[in-house]
Amino acid sequence: GWIFDLLVHGGFGVPEARYTEKQFRSDDEVYFADINKDRTRVVIATLGKSGSSAQIWDTENGQPVVELLGRAGLVNCAAFSPDGRFVVTASWDKTAQVWDASSGRRSGEPLGHAVTSAAFSSDARLVVTASLDRTAQIWDAATSKEAYPPLVHPSPVDFAAFSPDDHFVVTASWDGIARLWEVSNQKVRELSRHQGHVRSAAFSPDGKQVVTVSTDKTARVWDVATRSEER
């Protein structure tokens, strides 16, 4: 089976943080993994002979504890809400879905468009999805309704995530540009262009920086205030 390692740590930039490697074994191919805030559970997205699914594993004993219902398409992303109560998955069946992390039951209706990634806001009230339909969409996690107008791009969007204060969403697009969107009014700021698709992006814990990765074989760090690359 496939073996994947998880580095469980006590904090970023904390001198006394202790690092412990945990190993989990899955019989299926693993596409994505995320860990909850208290580091007691890991969610993984897998693909096997019986189809694609997401599973929640116990970090102490390395055993699966909850299996989320399989989807018609490949589950290519799975992420915990900040409080660990929910998981959101993105699937090639053109939907994202919020799940109860304790029971494995669906929470609300599917969030529908050709989803490539999904992530919660810091308060778990909102979900942002990226899509091949050239948009990112912000949803109300409780009602499964669109919370804001779509964030329209000129090309497909691979990834989207909230800033730590939920003021911004960062998106990564096939046109080589990462964009910062103000959630309240959809004002957009462009970061300088990569030479290839921007595949993913993430904020620093304080929200002052963004790191982007691209098919141009580079990762770049940007200052959010100035939108300039840090060197």
Image: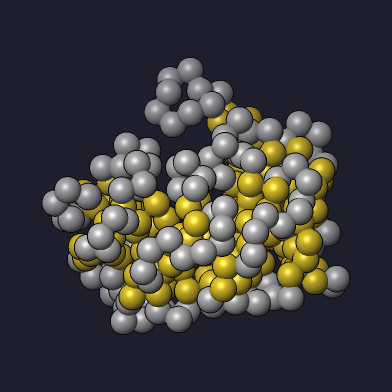
Determine the residue located farthest toward the top in the rendered image.
16
Give the image location of residue 13, x and y in percent.
40, 28
Give the image location of residue 220, x and y in percent.
29, 56
Q: Which quarter of the rendering shows the N terminus? A: bottom right
Give the image location of residue 215, x and y in percent.
40, 71
Please tell me which residue lies in front, 48 or 157.
157
Left or right? Give the position of 227 relative to 16. left
Left or right? Give the position of 28 relative to 4. right
Residue 180 vertical placement versus 17 (above, below): below
Residue 42 vertical placement versus 126 (above, below): above
x 31%, y 42%: residue:
207
In this figure, which colouring scheme has been used for the structure? Answer: secondary structure
The quadrant in which residue 171 appears is bottom left
Please tell me which residue lies in front, 68 or 225.
68
In the rendered picture of this protein, how many numbered marks are placed on residues?
A: 0
x 47%, y 52%: residue:
126
Give the image location of residue 113, x and y in percent.
53, 76
Q: Would residue 121 be visible to someone looking at this image?
A: yes
Determine the residue located farthest toward the right in the rendered image.
50
Left or right? Give the position of 40 relative to 81. right
x 31%, y 81%: residue:
154
x 45%, y 81%: residue:
133
Left or right? Give the position of 128 relative to 90. left
Please tell me which residue lies in front, 178 or 109.
109
Please tell me which residue lies in front, 183 or 143.
143
Q: Would residue 231 be visible to someone looking at this image?
A: no
